[in-house]
Image (cartoon, rainbow, N blue to C red):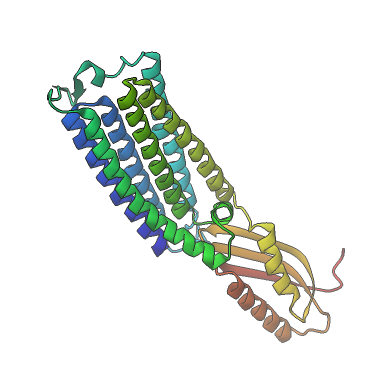
Amino acid sequence: MAGSRSVVLAALVANGAIAILKFFGFLLTGSAAMLSETYHSISDTGNQVFLLIGLRYSGRERDQRHPFGYGKAQFFYSFLVSVFLFGIAGWESLKHGYSEITAGGHGSEAAQGSVDFLFIQYTPPAWLDPLWVNYTVLLAAFAFETWALWKARAEMQRQIEANDWSGYKEAFRKTSDVTTLTALTEDTIALAGIVIALVGLFLTQQTGSEIFDQLSAVFIGIMLMGFALALAWENKRLLLGESLPRDEERKLEDIIRANDDVADIIDFRTVYFGPGRLLVSADVAFGPDLDTDEMDRAITEIERKLSEANESVRKVYIEPETDDHPS
């Protein structure tokens, strides 16, 4: 959890700094597009706050109403982030770009030379080139986002190595640390969005056509919405109580079968009750000659080996059966 918290704090600092930079860019240029980007970064900052709330809430001790603790709070708040990423950042960017295209480049307030903010009409100075201010702000934002992405990538790489996953594709499918996954995804698409925005600005500068800047907003919106849907899907599977992937379950089953006192596994189930918190339940048939003490020792040994094999295993319930159980 400490690794996830440091990742989210890094993203929070980066997004907060970027929001301030974009806001000053707006004050200097009066650009409505930069004001829209300010709202976007404020939304990203709010997302990190939600993730921190989820981390704090999930750390509460279990009680009578929540016997397995509050670990799934992280899944819930990460799901909220994916919804906000889709609904605010993605949809608003797509809508803004589309409205600018359909307005023929004359729909923005910036194009009219002034913009209203907090009931004050602001007109940028004539000598100031808004394009170069936007370049500077976006490049600074790129630096901050790169730092946040480096933190998130380092934590995810640690998990990949600890679980012997093949890479990020497998980690995205198997990880239960949705907080780090969300931060990593958000930082990645933020960097991609900055690159798209810079390309749009450059092409607009070179051609004099606003269509490239407008199309970049549309592409960013589509990209944000696509990644938000993927994040929502990943969080949904864990909110509904997903088990380990089948290949991981087989490894745990093999550990149980390797015990000399085990005759068969009648039923085997796993479920995540929080990030990195896995419950294992198994109905195990033991040999008929085992007495109670020997069976207890066998169960204790199985529980120990399961926990050693997978660090996510926090709860193990073994229901003993005899090997003459009904088929």
Does 251 appear above or below 144?
A: below
Does 318 appear above or below 13?
A: below
Between 149 and 201, the residue placed more toward the observer is 201
Q: How many labels does the image show?
A: 0
Q: In which quarter of the image is residue 120?
A: top left
Residue 2 at least partly seen = yes
Q: In this view, does 246 lie to the left or right of 102?
A: right
Looking at this view, name the residue that lies furthest to the front. Answer: 206
Q: Could you tell me which residue is drawn at 39 percent across and 28 percent down?
A: 217
Q: Could you tell me which residue is drawn at 43 percent across and 46 percent down?
A: 188
The C terminus sits in image quarter: bottom right
Q: Where is residue 294 in the image (x, y as percent from the top left)?
A: 72, 85
Q: In which quarter of the image is residue 209?
A: top left
Does 156 appear above or below 27?
A: below
Q: Is residue 86 left or right of residue 305?
A: left
Does 174 appear above or below 312?
A: above
Q: Could you tell me which residue is drawn at 43 percent across and 27 percent down?
A: 218
Q: Position of residue 311 (x, y in %)?
A: 55, 69
Q: Where is residue 238 in the image (x, y as percent from the top left)?
A: 56, 51
Residue 59 at least partly seen = no
Q: Position of residue 302 (x, y in %)?
A: 67, 77
Between 236 and 187, the residue placed more toward the observer is 187
Q: In this view, does 129 lie to the left or right of 63?
A: left
The N terminus sits in image quarter: bottom left
Q: Could you tell me which residue is drawn at 36 percent across and 39 percent down?
A: 194
